Amino acid sequence: MIDLPFRLRTLRRQHQLSLAALALRTSLTRSYLSKLERGLSNPSDTTIEQLAHAYGLTRDQLLGSGPEGLDEIVSVVRVADRQPMIRTGSSLGYQYQALAGKRRIRSMQPVVVVPPREFPDRQAAQPHEGEEFMLVIHGAVELMVGSRVWRLESGDAVYFDATLPHRMRTVSRQDAEVLVVGSR
């Protein structure tokens, strides 16, 4: 079973809701929601249903019970089951594989990236909100953040502010694979 007060607080923050906004969505009082998040009160079945509905989840997903709920909380993605995904950079030669599996609500966006052989056009280096962590799994890449370039080899890692323009390219003979984890 999960730590329900922590789960409720985390879900509300991930949805960027204040207690007042969640109270409007659920018809529960702000003070009662606060007590639930602090573990000072236990929710009824009706309250669980109201909260699940407010977050677009099933009861099992909210509580982390049953196979569906556990898949939402613990997501295992086997290497053979990785799915290609289309993102903004796909048209620029980047190849992506999703690693978050069935998790719909998350604070991070983990993907494996195979960068193109050439840097995409400068205009294509689109900054975005959050931060990024990268770990080179295989091969070597050049990472450009702003106007500075770093060569990263297998095992090297970098962490940076993703609001800066950034792009990377493969510089090894074989395709490079990079684990990229972005915050949301």
Image (tube, rainbow, N blue to C red):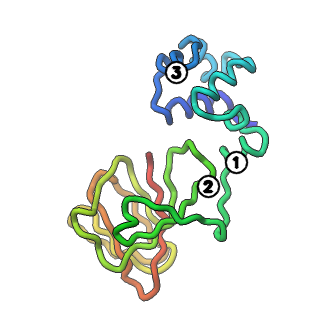
Q: Are marks 1 and 3 in contact (CB under 8 Å)?
A: no
* Location of residue 88 (image quadrant): bottom left
N-term mark: 3 or 2: 3
- Horizontal side of 17 relative to 162 (left or right) equals right
Q: Which mark is residue 101?
A: 2
Residue tagged 3: 22
**For the residue carrying disc 1, how many other residues have a C-alpha within 10 Å: few (<14), some (14-19), or many (20+)?**
some
Question: CA–CA distance between discs 3 and 2?
Answer: 27 Å
Amino acid marked by disc 1 = Asp
- Residue drawn at the location 60% of the way across and 29% of the way down: 8
* Location of residue 159 (image quadrant): bottom left
Q: Are marks 1 and 2 in contact (CB under 8 Å)?
A: yes
Element type where label 3 sits in the image? helix
Residue 136 lies, with reference to residue 52, above or below; the image says below
Residue 120 lies, with reference to residue 165, above or below; the image says below
Residue 109 on image: x %, y %: 49, 53
Residue 25 on image: x %, y %: 53, 20
Q: How many marks?
A: 3
Amino acid marked by disc 3 = Leu
